[in-house]
Amino acid sequence: MDISKLLPLIMGGKLGEREQAILKASQSSDPAAMTNLLTKIYSETPRQSDVYATFKRIIPAETLGKIIKYFDGARES
């Protein structure tokens, strides 16, 4: 799956200005354009502390449950 299909899925179909810029850069033949854009966006954007909602949208519930159980078990050990 490429970024043009993955990004709208992660964002719930609502693409803002930054997301549209990423899609445009992904269609460019210059890989440095995407790198520079992502570096700029991530330096300006605070990190999300809760990524569970995003994972829930892109990973099947059964798989996500197995991942959570694995990390909970690893934390207890």
Image: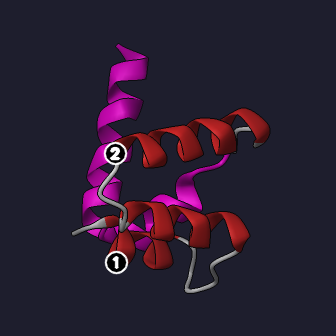
- Judge the density around disc 1: few (<14), some (14-19), many (≥20) Cα neighbours within 10 Å: few
Q: Is residue 9 left or right of residue 29?
A: right
Nearer the observer, 12 or 74: 12
Q: Which residue is mark 2?
A: 31
Residue 76 position, x and y percent, is 41, 19
Nearer the observer, 30 or 40: 30
Q: Quadrant of the C terminus?
A: top left
Q: Is residue 20 magenta?
A: no
Residue 5 position, x and y percent, is 34, 77
User: Which region shows up in magenta?
Assistant: 49-77
Disc number placed over residue 5 in the picture, else none: 1
Residue 8 position, x and y percent, is 48, 78
Q: Is residue 22 left or right of residue 47?
A: left
Disc number placed over residue 21 in the picture, else none: none
Q: Earlier in the sequence, mark 1 or mark 2?
A: 1
Nearer the observer, 41 or 57: 41
Amino acid under label 2? Pro
Tell me which residue sits at (39%, 62%) in the image: 26
Does 30 appear above or below 18?
above
Tell me which residue sits at (45%, 59%) in the image: 55
Amino acid under label 1? Lys
Q: CA distance from mark 1 to mark 2?
A: 18 Å
Does 6 appear above or below 32?
below
Count the marks: how many?
A: 2
Label 1: state its secondary structure: helix
- Judge the density around disc 2: few (<14), some (14-19), many (≥20) Cα neighbours within 10 Å: few
